[in-house]
Image (tube, grey):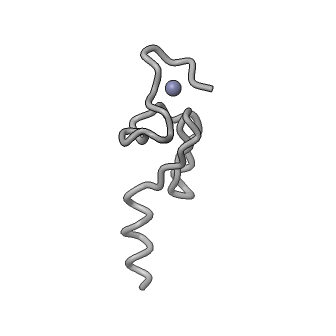
Amino acid sequence: MCSHRPPCPTADKPDHHSAVIVSAHPEQGWSLLCNGTIVFEVMSISDASRHL
Ligand SMILES: [Zn+2]
């Protein structure tokens, strides 16, 4: 899955969020990392709290 050198941390590692972004969706507020982790942007969280 990951072909980076050095290899990115796997999804079960504490630093899994530091893997390389393979698919970014800033308009939706999330990014897919090469280890299969989906990271939600901080901006979308503050965006959502504004609607509460
Ligand atoms: Zn990688």
Residue 51 found in image quarter: bottom left
| Residue at the image position 54 percent from the left and 48 percent from the top | 38
Which residue is situated farthest in the bottom direction here? 52
Instruction: Locate residue 3 relative to residue 39 in the image: left or right.
Output: right
| Residue occupying image coordinates x 39% and y 60% | 43
Q: Residue furthest right?
A: 1
* Left/right of residue 23 with respect to residue 21 in the rendered view: right
Q: Residue at x 41, y 66 (%)?
A: 45
**Is residue 6 found left or right of 25 in the rendered image?**
left
Residue 39: x and y, percent? Answer: 48, 50
| Quadrant of the frame with the C terminus | bottom left
On screen, 28 above or below 17?
A: below
Snapshot quadrant of residue 2:
top right
Residue 49: image location, x then y, percent? 39, 77
Determine the residue positioned at 44% across, 31% down: 9
Q: Which residue is farthest top?
A: 5
In-front residue for pair 46/11 = 11
- From the viewer's side, name the closer residue of 5 and 21: 5
Q: Quadrant of the N terminus?
A: top right
Task: Out of 22 and 34, give the one closest to the viewer.
Answer: 34
- Counting from the top left corner in percent of width and height, residue 48 is at 44, 74
Q: Is residue 11 above or below residue 30?
A: above
Residue 11 place in picture, x, y as percent: 50, 40
| Circle count | 0
